[in-house]
Image (cartoon, rainbow, N blue to C red):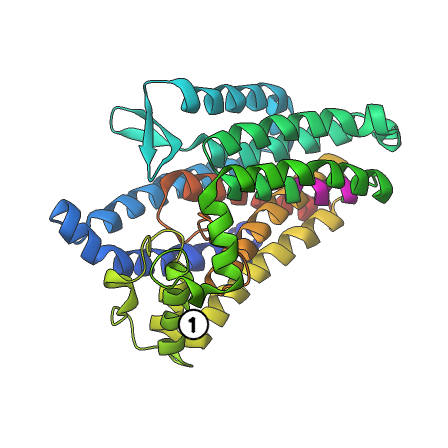
Amino acid sequence: GMEQRKAEMDGLLLLPSLGLALVGIVMVYSTSAAIGLEKYQDSCFFLKRQSLHLVIGLLIMTLAYLIPYSWWHSFAHSFLLLVIALLILVLVSPWSREVGGAKRWLTLGAFSFQPSEAAKLAMVFYLAHSFTRKKEKMRGFLLGLSPYLLVLGVFFLLLLLQPDLGTAIQITLMTFLLLFAANVRPTHLFLSGVGILPLLCIAIYQEGYRLRRIFAFLNPWKDPTDSGFQIIQSFLAMGRGGMWGVGLGEGRQKLFYLPEAHTDFILSVAGEELGFFGLLLILSLLGTLVIRGCWIALDNPDAYGRFLALGISFSIGIQGGINLGVITGLLPTKGMPFPYMSVGGSALITTLWSTGILLNISKTVRCQK
C-alpha cells in the first residue's frame, strides 16, 4: 500500500537535498535581486532561472530514482567520451561563451551548460564501471592504475585550459578517494599523487591570478582592494552575521562588496543573513546527505552500486568542503559553487541527477533486505 511506497524513498537523502535546494532558492533570491535589477531590470531574474533549473533537476532526479542504477553501467564509456568531446568543444568551438576570462560554457540558443559539471559524474560512472569489471587487476600498478591516471590527466588538462582548477582538483580528490576505497595500494596512490603535484604547481605558476590568490589567502589583508578582497568581504559578512544573522534579505555585503555572491560565495551571505546557526544547519544538511550516501555504499553487497554511491557522495562532499574552505579563508579563492545552493543550472541539475541515482541505490539496497 501507500505506506510501503513512502518507506521506499530515503528520507535522509531526500530531505537534506530538497532542504538545501529550497534554502538555496531563497538565498539566490536574496543575493541576486540587486544584481538582477541592475543587469536585467528584473530583481527576480536569477530566482526565476534557478527555479526553472530546480524543476528540471527534480524531474531528472525522479527519473534517476526510478531507473535501476545498474542501467548506468552500460553508459560509462560513451558518457566519458562524450564529456571529453564537449570539454574540447568548449575550448575550440564558436559556441562557447566566455565568462570572467574562463571558457566554461557551451551555448546553443537559449540553452547553455557547463561540461565541467558533467565531467564529475562521468568520472564517477567510469570509475565505478571499471573497478567492478577488473577487480583482481587493481593491485598491479601498470594495469591497475595507469588507465585511471590517464583519464584523470586528460580531464585535468582540459579543465586547466578553461581554466577551472577548482573542478580539476575536485575530480582528482574524488578519484584518489575512490581508488583508495577500491583497495589500490596506498604506496601506488602516493606515488601517483606525487606525480600530479608538479602539474598543479605549473598550473598555479602559469596563471598569475592563482598565485596572487594563494598569497592573498595566506594574508588577505596585504592586498585588501584586489586579490584579498573577496576573502575579507566574506569574513566581514560572517562577522556581521553573528550567531543569529542580520535577517533574510538584510545582508549588506552582497550588494556591492561580495562579487559573485549568488554563485561561489552564497554561504558567506547565508552566514551573514542566517548567522552561525543558519550556516550550521546548512552544513549539517549537507553532512547528513554525504554520510548517508557513504552508509548506503557500505551497505551495498553489489560492488558497482558501492563505488557509484561512494563516488557521488565524495564528489558532493568535496565540493561542499572546498566551498566552505574558500569562504572561511581556509583555502585560496576558487570558483566553486556550493552543492544544491549556488546559482548555476548545470551544477544543480547534475547534482540532483546524481542524488536521484543515490536514492535508487538506497531503495535497491533496502528492497533486497
Q: Residue furthest left?
A: 41
**Residue positioned 32% across, 37% down in the render:** 99
Question: Residue 247's spot in the image, x, y percent?
Answer: 29, 75
- In the depicted structure, whether residue 315 falls above or below residue 192: below
Question: Residue flagged by tag 1: what amino acid is it?
Answer: Gly
How many marks on residues?
A: 1
Q: What secondary structure is marked by label 1?
A: helix
Q: Is residue 16 visible?
A: no
Q: Is residue 224 visible?
A: yes
Q: Residue furthest bottom?
A: 243
Question: Residue 22's spot in the image, x, y percent?
Answer: 37, 57
> Which residue is nearer to you in this view: 252 or 347?
252
**Apparent side of residue 178 relative to residue 229 in the rendered image (left or right):** right
Question: Residue 81's spot in the image, x, y percent?
Answer: 56, 19
Question: Residue 43's spot in the image, x, y percent?
Answer: 16, 54
Magenta span has 24? no
**Apparent side of residue 363 relative to residue 242 in the rendered image (left or right):** right
**Apparent side of residue 356 relative to residue 76 in the rendered image (left or right):** left
**Apparent side of residue 207 relative to residue 140 in the rendered image (left or right):** left
- In the depicted structure, whether residue 246 falls above or below residue 230: below
Mark 1: few, some, or many residues within 10 Å (few <14, many ≥20)?
some
**Residue positioned 52% across, 44% down in the render:** 166
Q: Quadrant of residue 28?
A: bottom left
Magenta-highlighted residues: 174-180
- In the depicted structure, whether residue 359 falls above or below residue 74: below
> Which residue is nearer to you in this view: 7 or 194?
194
**Residue positioned 63% across, 56% down in the render:** 292
* Magenta-drawn stretch, dominant element (helix, strand or loop): helix
> Which residue is nearer to you in this view: 252 or 276?
252
**Which residue matches tag 1?**
278
**Residue positioned 33% across, 40% down in the render:** 100
